[in-house]
Image (cartoon, grey):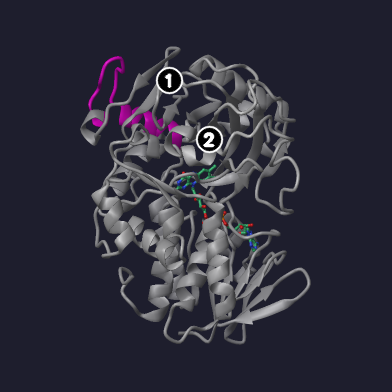
């Protein structure tokens, strides 16, 4: 084990890397560098005074497969088992997903077989249509790219198969691989959970990781963006705006493009490969209504680009996690998320004033509308300059037109999450092989973890950190 390990990036991948490093019998000195003013990366949850939780990033984690079980093991060790909110297999949010097409919601067939067959009213197998739609940026070679992606995902790397944000809505549950015998994971299997969240929202996982690693000697630094990374006298030299630090090993848990910008000129071929891993932006609009009901019950619905290229889909958050609706105490005060957003939060927090409607004290209904993705620029222009009112009105209109909800929700929170979903376009896996070869040929003590590489789901990110640390420690990746 190298004496000093610098982990760059304090999202779930970087935090999980610190956690695994510090569980080692003789842990190294661990330094975590995070550019923004908070830890968690895309794990962003807003809690309202009424106890409602709005997720601006991931909202549900799959328990299936070895990676899912390992995450639950970590959750238990962090003392969060009592906070887990599980969605059992027979729950409507597990069983029902929809596709909005031709102005109507169509139930998606359950099970992989149903997705791979053409099922009326669809002229082609839903899986391919939806996969192509969600993952292919306009202008690339869609079929080949999607096909290669699916081959990868459904082949040896099956546990990573449900990586995409919305793809999880379309794919059935399951998974394989060595699953550790952990009580929470056993419960998840017995109850056939399709997904889980945490009572305090997904961001509380990041908080728990910080609470775990801090007292174990990790040095955690916010407002510490890596600007330059180079080899110097057999060690890494990491340049920050106000200082320079050195380390024997670097675990990069920042987006590939951010690492590319920091690399020295002599790593130019590596920087070029990393810089080519693109990411799409998503506008996440959390909507809350009072005293209204959905016309259908389920996880949510997808919107194919043939129907509306700007709209990815709507997640019915209240169905899966009613615990996050909060206790209705009256008319909401103000709008969470519009103020008090931690400085340096990835994405652009914007919002509208809450528009109270409905009877105070009536139950709330929470939805998340996702817009943009590969089609963001085409639909809304530059993510950094996309007009908030346009995004909000598109989201409100979608909820009204697709679900018959009132045009004015009681609360609306908008976050434009810039470059948040890495795009595994044609040639991605070959690129990863070239990157690995470059690192091996030069014997560079650099590990690459996180969503840019082998899977974007929370489980994938945590697994990538665990595997990287396992390699450093010389332990098998499936050891809990
Ligand atoms: C809207 C949305 C919904 C999602 N929904 C789900 C879901 O329901 N289920 C699921 O499993 N997954 C979901 N995902 C995917 C998953 O949440 C992400 O892929 C995952 O959180 C990425 O974690 P990460 O640590 O790899 O990257 P990040 O979260 O991007 O963390 C990287 C960190 O590095 C920091 N950083 C960047 N540059 C530098 C630098 N130069 N120096 C230092 N620090 C730097 C950033 O500030 C950030 O904190 C969703 C993602 C999004 C955006």
In percent of width and height, residue 260 lies at 59, 60
Q: Is residue 280 visible?
A: yes
In percent of width and height, residue 74 lies at 41, 64
Q: Which mark is residue 117?
A: none
Sequence-first tag of 1 and 2:
1
- Residue displayed at 63% across by 20% down: 358
Q: In terms of secondary structure, where does tag 2 sit?
A: loop
- Residue displayed at 41% across by 55% down: 459
Q: In terms of secondary structure, where does tag 1 sit?
A: strand
Task: Provide the residue designation for mark 2.
Answer: 374
Q: Nearer the viewer, residue 39 or 328?
A: 328
Q: Nearer the viewer, residue 129 or 205?
A: 205
| Image quadrant containing the C terminus | bottom left
Q: Is residue 234 left or right of residue 355?
A: left
Task: Provide the residue designation for mark 1.
Answer: 100
Q: Are marks 1 and 2 in contact (CB under 8 Å)?
A: no
Q: Relative to 469, is 422 above or below?
A: above
Q: Counting other residues with Cα less than 10 Å from the Cα at mark 1, is it few (<14), some (14-19), or many (20 or more)?
A: many
Front position among marks 1 and 2: 1
Q: Is residue 324 left or right of residue 436?
A: right
Q: Is residue 156 left or right of residue 73?
A: left
In percent of width and height, residue 185 lies at 31, 57
- 228 inside magenta stretch: no
Q: Nearer the viewer, residue 95 or 273?
A: 95
| Image quadrant containing the N terminus | bottom left
- 128 inside magenta stretch: yes
Distance from Cα at disc 1 to Cα at disc 2: 19 Å
Query: How many marks do you count on the picture?
Result: 2
Q: Where does the magenta region start and end?
A: 115-135
Looking at the rendering, which quadrant does residue 362 occupy? top right
């Amino acid at each position: 084990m190298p004496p000093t390990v610098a982990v760059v990036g304090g999202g779930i991948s970087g935090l999980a890397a610190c956690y695994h490093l510090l569980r080692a019998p003789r842990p190294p000195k661990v330094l975590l560098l995070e550019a923004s003013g908070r830890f968690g990366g895309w794990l962003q949850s807003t809690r309202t005074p009424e106890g409602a939780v709005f997720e601006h990033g991931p909202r549900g984690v799959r328990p299936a497969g070895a990676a899912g079980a390992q995450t639950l093991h970590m959750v238990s060790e962090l003392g969060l088992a009592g906070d887990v909110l599980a969605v059992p297999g027979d729950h409507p949010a597990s069983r029902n997903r929809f596709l909005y097409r031709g102005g109507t919601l169509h139930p998606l067939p359950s099970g992989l077989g149903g997705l791979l067959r053409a099922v009326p009213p669809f002229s082609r197998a839903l899986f391919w249509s939806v996969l192509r739609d969600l993952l292919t940026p306009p202008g690339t070679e869609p079929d080949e790219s999607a096909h290669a992606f699916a081959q990868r995902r459904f082949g040896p790397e099956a546990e990573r198969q449900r990586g995409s944000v919305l793809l999880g809505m379309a794919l059935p549950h399951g998974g394989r691989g060595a699953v550790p015998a952990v009580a929470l994971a056993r419960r998840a299997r017995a109850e056939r959970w399709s997904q889980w969240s945490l009572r305090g929202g997904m961001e509380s996982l990041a908080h728990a990781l910080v609470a775990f690693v801090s007292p174990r000697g990790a040095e955690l630094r916010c407002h510490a963006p890596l600007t330059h990374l180079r080899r110097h006298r057999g060690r890494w030299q990491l340049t920050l705006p106000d200082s320079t630090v050195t380390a024997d090993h670097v675990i990069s848990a920042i987006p590939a493009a951010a690492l590319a910008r920091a690399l020295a000129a002599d790593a130019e071929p590596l920087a070029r490969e990393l810089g080519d891993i693109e990411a799409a932006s998503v506008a996440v609009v959390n909507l809350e209504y009072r005293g209204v009901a959905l016309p259908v019950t389920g996880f949510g619905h997808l919107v194919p680009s043939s129907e509306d290229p700007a709209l990815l889909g709507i997640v019915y958050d209240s169905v899966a996690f009613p615990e996050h609706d909060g206790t209705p105490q009256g008319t909401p005060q103000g709008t969470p998320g519009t103020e008090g957003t931690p400085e340096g939060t990835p994405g652009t927090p914007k919002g509208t004033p809450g528009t109270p409607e409905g009877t105070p004290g009536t139950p709330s209904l929470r939805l998340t509308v996702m817009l943009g993705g590969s089609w963001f620029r085409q639909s809304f222009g530059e993510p950094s300059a996309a007009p908030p009112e346009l995004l909000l009105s598109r989201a409100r209109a979608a909820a009204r037109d697709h679900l018959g909800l009132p045009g004015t929700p009681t609360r609306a929170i908008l976050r434009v999450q810039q470059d948040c979903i890495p795009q595994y376009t044609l040639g991605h896996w070959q690129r990863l092989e070239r990157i690995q070869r470059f690192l091996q040929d030069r014997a560079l003590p650099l590990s690459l973890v996180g969503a840019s590489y082998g899977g974007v789901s929370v489980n994938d990110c945590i697994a990538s950190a665990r595997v990287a640390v396992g390699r450093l420690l010389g332990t098998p990746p499936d050891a809990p």
